[in-house]
Amino acid sequence: MNGKIWKVAKEVAIGILLVLSLWLMINGALKEGNNNFQFGTLMDTVIALSNAIMAGAAIFAANEAKKWFQQKNKLNNLDSAHQKIKDYENLLWLINDRIFKDTAIRANYKNDVQNKKIDIEVLKNKANSLLNPKTTTDLDDLSLIYSEQARLRRYGIKLTQEFKETINRIITKRSTYLDLHYEYLVYIFVNYNDPNQNEILDRSIELEEAKIELAKEFELILSNTPLDKNYDLSELN
């Protein structure tokens, strides 16, 4: 872009120089015999005007190039911001994806338990495996959400107040849902060993309600809210 501006400026300057030179030479010829006309003075004037035009063209080209680089830098920052927002959105929506996966996990485990053809130790080991994320990946996922929030601020991307409140609700409802999810898995295994036990209650109804409430945040609120309503990019240069 800078090269094109410079080329145009040079062509304009050369054109003006040729026209001006021709005009001055014709004007000098028409004044033949006038002692005040001097060819050297004419050339000095032409050279001075040419230098002024070239200097102006160079300043113009420099200013245009600066504007172009500033605009390009802003566009690069916006592209980078959009990618970071996309990454953060993917983290949030993994919570919603987890709801459907957990539903299948509970159904499969319940089917294994009720099958009564699977060894008790196998069922116990599977239960422990299903409960393991409570103290590992679940905490890691939550930590990553908070960490990525901090990274967004680091790059000049702000979450709107309304979006912050939505995220806080999601995290709270996620916690309630996961507690009930793991409690129900334990209930399935314990109830298999002793159907008359009353230490762990069947809270499948509360679990279903918690699942629906969490899903609503994604499918009725987030999915219907434009991204520009959730993120403030006004501080990006």
Image (cartoon, rainbow, N blue to C red):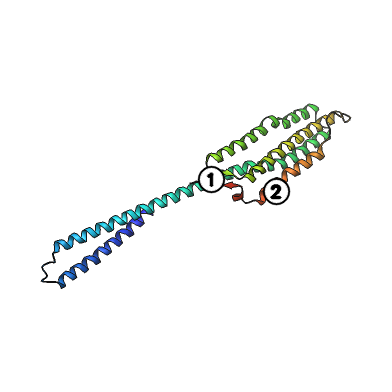
Residue 173 percent location from the top left of the image = 72, 39
Residue 6 percent location from the top left of the image = 33, 56
Tell me which residue sits at (51%, 48%) in the image.
78
13 relative position to 143: left or right:
left
> Quarter of the image holding residue 14?
bottom left
Most extreme residue toward the bottom is 30
Quick check: 168 above or below 221? Answer: above
Residue 234 percent location from the top left of the image = 53, 48
Determine which residue is flagged by label 1: 81
Q: Residue 219 carries which label?
A: 2
Most extreme residue toward the front is 36
Most extreme residue toward the top is 121
Spatial distance from mark 1 to mark 2, Cα to Cα? 24 Å
Q: Which of the two discs, 1 and 2, labels the residue nearer the N terminus?
A: 1
> Quarter of the image holding residue 30?
bottom left
* Badge 1 density bin: few <14, some 14–19, many ≥20, Cα 10 Å: some
173 relative position to 83: left or right:
right
Q: Are marks 1 and 2 in contact (CB under 8 Å)?
A: no
Quick check: 150 above or below 1? Answer: above
The three-letter amino acid code for the residue at tag 1 is: Ala
* Badge 2 density bin: few <14, some 14–19, many ≥20, Cα 10 Å: few
